[in-house]
Amino acid sequence: MKAVVYKGPYEVAVEEVDDPKIQDPTDVIVRITSTAICGSDLHMYEGRTDAEPGITFGHENMGIVEEVGSGVTTVKKSDRVVMPFNVACGFCDNCRAGKTGFCLTVNEPGTAGGAYGYVGMGPYPGGQAEMLRVPFADYNCVQLPKGEEHEQDFAMLADIFPTGYHATELAGVQVGETVAVYGAGPVGLMAAYSAQLKGASRVFVVDNVEHRLDLVKDLGAEPINFDNGDAAQQIHDAVQAYGVDRGIDAVGYQATEPSGEEQPAVVLNQLVDTVRHTGGLGIVGLYVPSDPGAPDEHSAKGELLFRIGRFFEKGQSMATGQADVKRYAHKLRDMIIAGRAKPGFVVSQELPLEDAPGAYEKFDNREPGYSKVLLQPGR
Ligand SMILES: NC(=O)c1ccc[n+]([C@@H]2O[C@H](COP(=O)([O-])OP(=O)(O)OC[C@H]3O[C@@H](n4cnc5c(N)ncnc54)[C@H](O)[C@@H]3O)[C@@H](O)[C@H]2O)c1
Ligand SMILES: [Zn+2]
Ligand SMILES: [Zn+2]
């Protein structure tokens, strides 16, 4: 089959790879209908992780079940399903607690959490391909209504809609509160959207890419351009108080200063300034323990200059990590079916798998029209 294979920094290719096979009785094989490119893929694409050439990308996958292992009970051939990006077992301590991003079964001993097509997340090839093997399929498939309706909305259930929602949970967003989201990429937009669904009174989104800030406006949230002055101060001025109730990081360690220079802790520190005393910080932007392209030797080891003193003084709390997608995917799916949520508004392109190399380049350059790309094999 064809798949998107990482060749080295700034290079992916669509190549022939082995078809996936049922390896365990609890597996299914899914024929992919839509698979999205994610900002998380860009960290690997840019050579800013330990990912080795040869890895197949793709953790945001949905499709039609093609083959079913003998031990699978609820998933049937020809079911339409979306797969949370976390590969999880469903029965370990963390899965039972709903922390499916930290499954203790699916990765090496001493680590937690698995994902398709991601460095350090276990031996699971990605789904930017014609087919995907799904382990523990009864747990890792989320059933969808048959047909082709809501394809874009449902594709967002694999990662960014639940991840945006998770960010609001980590930050502790409650009805009526004010929220600031750093990053107007797809994840930031989904976090802002989720805050609105939860009844936030005002939602600010910070970035410096104008066409992304236009999407913030379309959403009915308030865009803040950090090139126009300190973002925290702009938000304080807007709310006429020393901070918003909740802050969300949807940028991660490749955050930039207005000059364009990378400063890995800048968003974390901005959040401390932006959020009020005793407010909550939800961090879903990615931070890595090892960054081969880091601007200095400490950040190369994931050691950042975080202003813990000010953070402590303000009595804030912070929660971090990979999103536990499975925890929210069924409920968010039901909101889509009921017409109460339309996360597919972020999708800007549907392209055949063959177009992956160009799409990676344009998404990486944050070109207009490349806010969220769906690859559709067989298109
Ligand atoms: N925790 C999870 O489970 C999870 C899931 C998906 C993605 N992520 C991570 O979330 C992050 C965002 O993903 P995405 O797909 O939206 O990526 P993206 O690269 O498309 O978006 C990041 C945005 O941040 C903006 N930005 C850069 N520096 C900034 C700053 N100082 N202040 C404000 N904005 C700034 C960029 O201009 C860009 O628009 C990535 O780090 C990704 O790896 C985490
Ligand atoms: Zn993703
Ligand atoms: Zn588990």
Image (spheres, rainbow, N blue to C red):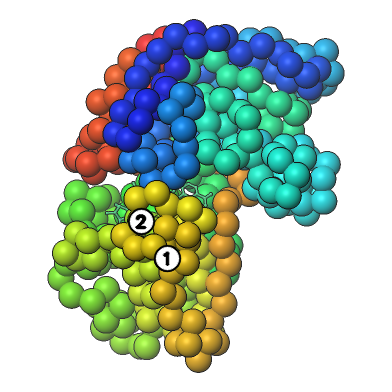
Q: Secondary structure at mark 1?
A: loop
Residue plotted at (31% across, 87% down): 240
Q: Which residue sits furthest front? A: 297
> Ligand 1 within 8 A of label 2's CB?
no
User: Considering depth in this image, is 261 or 95 the residue closer to the camera?
Assistant: 261
Query: As displayed, is residue 163 above or below residue 181?
Result: above
Query: As displayed, is residue 213 above or below residue 88?
Result: below
Question: How many numbered marks have been drawn onto this rendered protein structure?
Answer: 2
Are circles 1 and 2 on residues that touch, CB within 8 Å?
yes
Residue plotted at (71% across, 40% down): 108
User: Considering depth in this image, is 131 or 34 the residue closer to the camera?
Assistant: 131
Q: Secondary structure at mark 2?
A: loop
User: Considering depth in this image, is 175 or 115 the residue closer to the camera?
Assistant: 115
286 relative to 99 in the view: left or right: left
Residue 252 picture location, percent across and down: 41, 57
Quarter holding residue 225: bottom left
